[in-house]
Image (cartoon, helix red, strand yellow):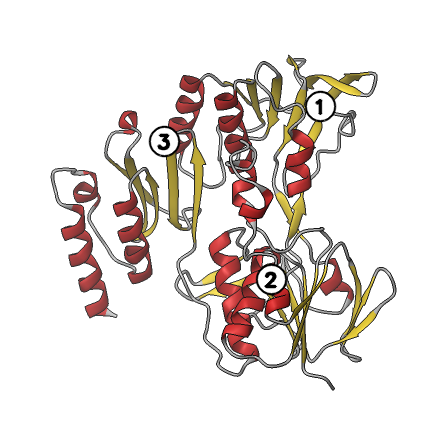
Amino acid sequence: MTERVIIVGAGHAAGQAATSLRQKKYAGEIVMIGDEAYVPYQRPPLSKAFLAGELTVERLYFKPAHYYPDHNVTLKLSTRAESINPSAHTVTTADGESLEYSKLILATGSRVRELPIPGNDLDGVHYLRSIADVEAMHKDFVAGKRIVVVGGGYIGLEVAAVAVKTGLDVTILETESRVMNRVVAREISQFFQNMHREEGATLELGRRVQEINGADGKVTSVICADGFTVPADMVVIGIGIIPNVELAEAAGLKCSNGIVVDEYCQTTDADILAIGDCTRHPNKLLGRHLRLESVHNAIEQGKTAAANIIGEPIAYNQVPWFWSDQYNVKMQIAGMSDVHEQFVMRGDPSTRSFAAFYLQQGKIVAVDAINSPREFMLGKKLVAAGAKIPIKDLADTSKDFKEMATAAIAAASAQA
């Protein structure tokens, strides 16, 4: 059999896997299959600088387009992988081509969760996941237009922030009682709610969208379950994403809220690995399995899969981290705050520069840093070490944070 790695998917994780394989001197063939027309690109700027018109498509690329032919990586773009035959070691594409592999990497990513309501197919209704999605939005994304953003998560709030800065009339509709309900404490939600309102967005909480109205095939308004109605020239729906596991499931691989892999990105098939948004993997630092939707995870799993394939396996075991840019605020999150017993703020939210810490059994398990890069960088180390700092000290801004963090990390390391 020809030594060939096939990568199904052409996103950030796929780009990193191909790059790492060549950096590690993998001499076999590399074939990447992607259903979009573009070489691997970065998705975070889509809802930020690219939507704002501040970046060209080429600036989104993970590597320049010429990198792939220059490094003997065959790209099959605008091509969908239809099926996998693990016993024959083949991938069949939608146009009927069958490709043999020695190792297969699934980097199938995720897709938007659609809102199944009347009017969701009207002209002017958008989801944001790809370059094509943003390009479709641009014709309506102009000053003076009325935009309704459905969903108060990261994507919805980032789109709203860019829309406000562009001069659109912005209304955000969120089903829950607060924004970013699943990922941050109530106090952090309140900060972002206040900020969006201060910047000029209208924020409506507890509003479940029931129908999108239109005229002549074009959106005109959004109707909520309680009858609340908002006029709209365009609607952007951001209510989460779904991992693309169908190929893996059909091939007999174990899946459970993602393609199940070990710390080396190995699936239940010895010659198939999986990376990125589509995977559910163990994290020994946190003591549980995670499915992460983040650039950091995509990059690190891409590196891990490549190392595994060339016979130099290194376990992926790192503190998860994320970020969001809204107006003049950069929020950086380290760790996972969904399980915690204590919460404490450090600094004054009204300054738009502060941090929040989440603790479980006295250990710092997560930090939300708002325009606070020092707390973010040291926070990652505190989470990794399982370090402890008393709540009263974390809240006391007269105490030097770096000194406290350094001492806490050293103490945790000594006890390990």
Q: For the residues marked 1 and 3, what is the alpha-carbon distance in whole angstroms? A: 29 Å
Mark 1 belongs to which amino acid? Answer: Gln
Mark 3 belongs to which amino acid? Answer: Glu
Taking 261 as reference, is 113 above or below it?
above
Q: Going from the N terminus, do you reach mark 2 or mark 3 first? A: 2
Circles 2 and 3 in contact, beta carbons < 8 Å: no
Q: Which mark is residue 187?
A: 3
Q: Which residue is mark 2?
A: 14
Circles 1 and 3 in contact, beta carbons < 8 Å: no
Quadrant into which the C terminus falls: bottom left
Residue at x-position 42% and y-position 49%: 339
Q: Which residue is mark 1?
A: 210
Count of numbered circles in the view? 3
Q: Taking the image as drawn, is residue 251 in sight?
A: yes
Instruction: Report crowding for label 2: few under 14, some 14 to 19, many 20 or more residues within 10 A (C-alpha).
Output: many
Q: For the residues marked 2 and 3, what is the alpha-carbon distance in whole angstroms? A: 37 Å
Residue at x-position 58% and y-position 55%: 277
User: Residue 305's x, y, as percent?
Assistant: 55, 71
Secondary structure at numbered mark 1? strand
User: Residue 414's x, y, as percent?
Assistant: 19, 69
Instruction: Report crowding for label 1: few under 14, some 14 to 19, many 20 or more residues within 10 A (C-alpha).
Output: some
